[in-house]
Amino acid sequence: MTERSNSTPPLTAAADRAPRLGTVIRFQPNAYLDGVHSLADSGFRVASSSEFRDAIAVPNDFGGADVQYFERFGIAIVRQDAERVRAFLAKHGDAVVQSARAERRYRALVGTQSRAERPSGPRRIERAYVEGYRDAVVEFADQLLGNTSATPDMVRHVASDESALTWGLQAVKADLSRRTGCGIRVAVLDTGFDETHPDFRGRAVVKKLFASNSSDSDLNGHGTHCVGTACGPRSPVGAPGYGIAYETEIFAGKVVGEDGNASDRSVIAGITWALDQRCHIISMSLALDLLLGDMPDEDFERIGQGCLNAGTLIIAAAGNASARPTRIAPVASPANASTIMAVGAIDARGDICAFSSGGLNANQAVDIAAPGADVLSAAPGGGHRRMDGTSMATPHVAGVAALIAESNASFRGAALWARVLQLAKAVELPARDVGKGIAQALTG
Amino acid sequence: MPEPDETIDVTIRVAASFQARLDEVVSALNDAGLTDVDVHRRFLMISGSIASAQLPQLSKIDGVSSVRPARKFRAI
C-alpha cells in the first residue's frame, strides 16, 4: 500500500545475531546415524533439530551445543575449533562423511544496503544506462517481430489509456472475459469494507468483525480498495471501471484492526468464517515479513490445505519488503505456505515493482503476479484513490480467479489454482518474481 | 524473555490423530491455565492466552503438537 510498512529487521542485524561460523558436514546417505554417533563418541556435544520440534523457538546455537544435527538432511554444523574438526574428519571421514565445508553466511542477492545507503551518482547513471539499453533492445525486437512477443510493452501500451478501465483490468484482460463472477463468493479479509459506497449499491455484501478493539467500519481504506479491485464495478460514476468480478457476492471480514495489525486469532477465525460461508476464494492482502532462511509455517500449510480440500482457494500478498534493485526480500507469511497462492506485483510498464518480495527461500515461491502499482479503486466515503502494493495485486488475482471459477464448476480449490496458473501470461521476468506470469481472465 | 507473570497470546496446533478428542485437549489446556480460548475446529487449532510461567505446561498435554507465540500480520 502507499504507506508501506517495512518491519523486516535488516539482514545485517540478523547476521550480527548469528553465532560464529563453523564447519558443515554432510554425512553419507546410508551413514547418518553412524556419523552423528561418531561425533558424539569424539566428545562433541550434539543437539538434534528434533529436540526443538515442539519448542516455541529454536535457539540459534541449539542451546550451546558443539554440533547442531539436522537429522532429516544428515547434516551437522560443528562449531568447535578447527583442529578438533580436522582430527574428527581424519579419523572418521572416509567411513561416514560425504562432504565438509566452511559454513557460509547468506545475504540477499545484491547486498543489504537500504535505499538511503546506496551509493548515488555513478550507480544511478549505470542503472539509467542499462534501462535505456534494455528499452532500445525491446523496441528493436518489437519492430523485427511485429510487436507480437509477450513483452512488457503490451502492458505499457494498455497503461496509457484509463478512460474506460484501469490499467490493471486491461493488463489482466478482464474486459475480454464475458464472465462477471455471478454465483461466486469472494471473501476479502482485510481492514473492513465501506458497503455504503455508491459504487456498491445493490450488491450482496456480508460483513463480519474479527479484529479486537475495533469498529466494523473501514477507517483505513485498505480493505475497501481491495474489495473494489476484486469485486467492484465496471461502470462507476466518475472513475474508470476498476472491478474485475463485478457480480460476485462480497464477504468482507475485518481481521485487521484500527492499529493496522491482524493477529493469528483473527486471521484464522476469518478464514474459518469464509469457509462456513462457502466462499470459493479468499483474498488476503496482509503479511508478516520474513528473513532469508525462514521456513514455511506449518499452521498455514495446514490451513491452506484445509481450504483447498473444502474447495476454497486462498490468495495472499507476497509482501512489500523488497527495495529493488539493492535488496530482494523473501515471500512473507502466510503467502509463503505452499498451499496458499502468493502474488507479486508489476507496474504499468510491466516491470516488477521495487517493493515486491521474491521467491528466495526454498519452496516458498511467488506463484503469479498482477498489477500492484498506481492501482485505482474504491475509497471509504464514496471516492476513489490510487494505492501501491502486492496488496493491490492480490485482489486482481482474486477477481480473475472468480471469473475462472464461474466459467466451470469444476474449477474449485486446487483445480482453480491450477487453472489460474495455466492461464497466466508468461513474461520476460524471473519466475522468482512473477511465478507463472501475469494473471489473465481469458475464460471465453 | 517475558516476565513470569506476563500474559502472552499463543497459537496451538493439535495433532490430527486427536481430532475426535479435541474437546479433551481443550479441557486440558484450560486446566493448564489457558484463557481467552478460541477453538478453530476445522483446522484443529486453538488460540488463547497464558501466563508465560505456565507456558511449558501446554506442550506436555497429550494431543498438542505445537505451541508458539501468536504473530501479528499487517495490511500491506
Image: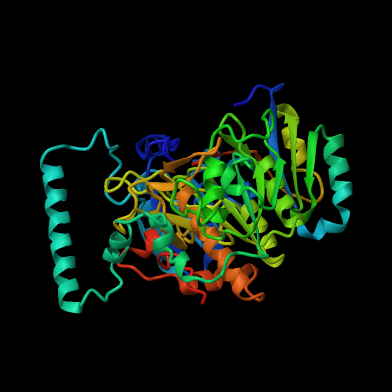
Asked which quadrant contains residue A351, the reply is bottom left
Which residue is rendered at x = 44% and y = 48% of the image? A239
User: How far from the left and from the top, in percent, is residue A115?
Assistant: 27, 37
Whole-percent x, y for residue A133 in the image: 12, 59
Residue at screen point 47% across, 52% down: A318
Is A144 situated left or right of B42 in this image?
A: left
Image-based side of A48 in relation to A80, left or right: right
Q: Residue at x 65, y 70 (%)?
A: A412
- How many numbered marks have been drawn onto this rendered protein structure? 0
Q: A79 or A230, which is in the foreground? A: A230
Q: Is residue A256 visible?
A: yes
Q: Along the line of sight, which residue is nearer the eye, A411 or A417?
A: A411
Specify the quadrant that holds the N terminus of chain B.
top right
Looking at the picture, does residue B44 appear above or below residue A383? below
The percent coordinates of residue B61 (x first, y second) are 81, 44
Q: Check the image and report above or below for B34 versus A334.
A: above
Q: How is the image coloured?
A: rainbow
**Rendering coords of residue A55 (x, y %):** 64, 43
Is residue A295 visible to us here? no
Drawn side of residue A292 relative to residue A400, left or right: left
Q: Is residue A319 above or below residue A342?
A: above
Question: In terms of depth relative to the viewer, which is nearer, A140 or A436?
Answer: A140
Q: Residue furthest front?
A: A237
Q: Nearer the viewer, residue A13 or A325?
A: A325
* Corner quadrant of residue A91: bottom left
